[in-house]
Amino acid sequence: MLNQNGHLTIDEKIRELLVSALKVSRTVVDSCSSGTPLLGNGVGLDSVETMALIAAIEGKFDVSVPDTDLNAALFESLESLSKYVLRKVEGRMTMYDREIDG
């Protein structure tokens, strides 16, 4: 999925991380909707894999995910995780804008 600027969406980048960093089957990832759970009967990530996904997200998006944000709701679905990452990225950009203007 490309956004208006022709760039991959956060959702698509997370899907790519699932395949490249966590070795989740491309078939499984491609069959997921945005509402597919990341834990349990959805994608099937376990606790170690969720931590690996968070580390990959931190590196890919240049964001920090504090331990206090790590809860089951964050991994409720691909959409919930994508929205969280979007908020973190937007927050980082706002801080960057303040540093430039400040």
Image (cartoon, grey):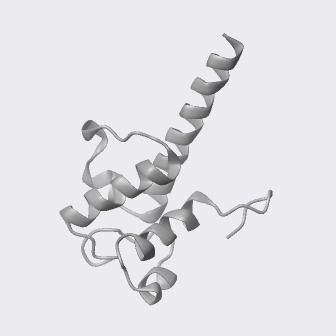
Closest to the observer: 16 or 9?
Answer: 16
Asked if residue 9 lies left or right of residue 18, the reply is right
Residue 1: x and y, percent?
67, 70
Residue at the extreme left of the image, as rendered: 47
The residue at 50%/55% (across/down) is 82
Asked if residue 37 lies left or right of residue 30, the reply is left
Asked if residue 48 lies left or right of residue 6, the reply is left
The residue at 44%/50% (across/down) is 59
The residue at 39%/69% (across/down) is 21
Q: How many marks?
A: 0
Closest to the observer: 25 or 11?
Answer: 25
Closest to the observer: 59 or 39?
Answer: 59
Q: Quadrant of the C terminus?
A: top right
Asked if residue 5 lies left or right of residue 60, the reply is right
Vertical comparison of 87 with 99: above or below: below
Residue at the extreme right of the image, as rendered: 5
The residue at 67%/24% (across/down) is 97
Looking at the rendering, which quadrant does residue 8 occupy? bottom right
Residue 5: x and y, percent?
80, 57
Residue 98: x and y, percent?
64, 18
